[in-house]
Amino acid sequence: MANLSSSTIMLTGAGGALATAVAQELEDAGAQLVLVGRGEPLARAADRFPATEVLDLDLRDPASVDALRKVKVDALVHTVGTYTTQDVQKATTDDLRELFDTNMLTLFHAVQGVLPHMLRQKDGLIMGVSAGQAARLSGPKAALYTASKAAVAAYVLSLHDELKARGVRGCVLYPMGAIDTPENREAGFEWEETIDPRGLAKSVAHALTRPDRAHVTELKIYPDV
């Protein structure tokens, strides 16, 4: 099992299906958690997992950056995101704003919050969750979602190349299929078509424990079919 007993890790989207699996894995590995989320899902996560800080923040709001800068963390695992579909010709500006604000702007603000401390200590890791469509650079019926998740990947990898010499690394996690959640089961995905969230969480922990000279920058995780 990964050992993260000396690490403080900020987990955004606390209370979500993926974040809950990641929180359990990180707790099992001994990490100190900083939970960032909204409302009732955050409250449930805080009840379930001990955390050094619990922050109820809308990461779409630039004001969230100042709140995040008051917390010192060694890694950021950003799971905030949304998924919608629409025909290309029917997509609206509101659709674009919703997807880019939730998938990309939240990441930007989270990074702006944690980065000053990481640069001062010359050590840190920032992980963003992209998508299989972004890895393939094609998402029929989900062009805006694909573009927003491709932006996540490009941003994290660019950050990595820019800051690795200063001790801050980036890593992109690509779930190459739907994650096994109650919502996806209700949407009609079969069990074998989905990815085990606990397996994704173990991949997160694996990336967080890699040494600088053997670091991981991209992880593609596939379902069984």
Image: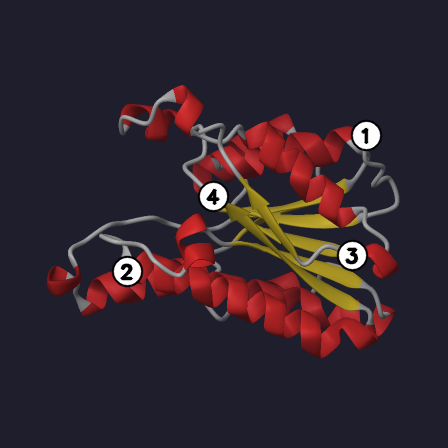
Instruction: Give whichever of discs 1 and 4 has the lower sequence position.
Output: 1
Amino acid at pointer 3: His
Q: Read off the residue under disc 3.
A: 215
Amino acid at pointer 2: Ala
| Image quarter in which the C terminus is found | top left
Q: CA distance from mark 2 to mark 4?
A: 16 Å
Q: Read off the residue under disc 2.
A: 143
Q: CA distance from mark 2 to mark 3?
A: 31 Å
Instruction: Give whichever of discs 3 and 4 has the lower sequence position.
Output: 4
Q: Residue at x 68, y 34 (%)?
A: 202
Residue 60 visible in the snapshot: no
Element type at marker 4?
Answer: loop
Instruction: Give whichever of discs 2 and 3 has the lower sequence position.
Output: 2
Q: Is residue 178 above or below residue 64?
A: above
Q: Read off the residue under disc 4.
A: 176
Q: Residue at x 83, y 65 (%)?
A: 123
| Image quarter in which the N terminus is found | top right
Q: CA distance from mark 1 to mark 4?
A: 24 Å
Residue 29, x across and y down, in percent: 79, 33
For residue 180, side relative to residue 211 (left or right): left
Amino acid at pointer 4: Met
